[in-house]
Amino acid sequence: MTEDPWANLKRFTDARIGLGRSGSAMPTREVLNFALSHAMARDAVTTPIDWTPIEKGLSNLGLSTLRIASAASDRSEYLRRPDLGRRLSDVSREALVRASEVEGSAKPDLVILVGDGLSSLGVAANTLAYMSAFMPYVVKAGWKLSPVLLADDARVALGDEAGEILGGKAVLVLIGERPGLSSPDSLGVYLTFSPRIGIKDADRNCISNIRQRGLSYDEGTFKTAWLLREAFRRGLTGVNLKDDSQFLIEGQPGPELIG
């Protein structure tokens, strides 16, 4: 087997570099690793999520939860019909309407929805650590939260309908990201101001690759809190709201904000 000169760089990245070769082919070890990664990615998409540990963990953080589901009847339909993953099931819609009526005029500042998305592994592995790091920002800012929604067969836009029904000023969607061959366990966070059915992706902000070997929970929640603060201050999210939080992280003055 011939070692690749880049092999020593593999400790810095999960990317497939420095694979080496055996004759004119890849080494058996790398072929098997590729097959394993592909299997893990498939499992991340198809394995049902167990919400019970997440419910217990969120309860320990002082957060109530409510289980909901999209209009997709099962996982197979969810994968074939992305549009159904963006709308609530009839039962879930009615449950949210009742929850909104109970709250009356006391509408939440922020609706948080946790969806299995395309990686139940990413949600199971990262949600509690993310929320533990995020809650101090919520407490400090005094933001009123709805019950945390735990959504089966969810796409990002499911938060638009849920947030609109609950009357939230903004919705924060934590969702399992489409798995890659080196990252089957990533969590994505999507922030949308004034959620409503039909909003465009250009009106959201996304923080991606939150996981132990990706963007750290501390940095991910710092960015989330910064974007939320600016969203509430300026009344918008999306392409017109740039993430300038790195200037604060690096201790540098940020550019003058417009608006």
Image: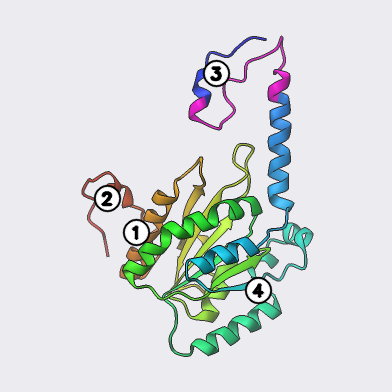
Residue drawn at x 59%, y 66% is 55
Horizontal arrangement in the rendering, residue 38 relative to residue 161 (left or right)? right
Q: Quadrant of the N terminus?
A: top right
Asked if residue 29 lies in the magenta stretch, the reply is yes
Question: Mark 4 is on which residue type?
Answer: Leu
Is 140 above or below relative to 4?
below
Residue 208 % position (x, y): 50, 49
* CB contact under 8 Å: marks 1 and 3: no
Where does label 2 land, which residue?
248
For badge 2, the amino acid type reads: Leu
Q: Residues within 10 Å of mark 3 (few under 14, many from 20)?
A: few
Q: CA distance from mark 2 to mark 4?
A: 38 Å
Residue 239 position within the rendered picture, expressed as x and y whole percent measured from the top left: 41, 57
* Residue beneath the point at 56% across and 69% down: 159
Residue hosting label 1: 226
Q: CA distance from mark 1 to mark 2?
A: 10 Å
**Dot 2, how many residues are within 10 Å of its Cα: few (below 14), some (14-19), or many (20+)?**
few
- Residue topped by disc 3: 7
Q: With respect to residue 109, does 228 lie above or below?
A: above
Given the image, on which type of amino acid does mark 1 rest?
Answer: Trp
Q: Earlier in the sequence, mark 1 or mark 4?
A: 4
State yes or no: discs 1 and 2 in contact (Cβ < 8 Å): yes
Q: Residue 231's x, y, as percent?
A: 36, 66
> Magenta residues?
11-30
Q: Nearer the viewer, residue 61 or 73?
A: 61
135 versus 45 height, above or below: below
Name the residue tied to disc 4. Answer: 88
SS under mark 1: helix
Mark 4 lies on a secondary structure that is loop
Query: Where is residue 119 drawn, in percent x and y?
Result: 64, 52
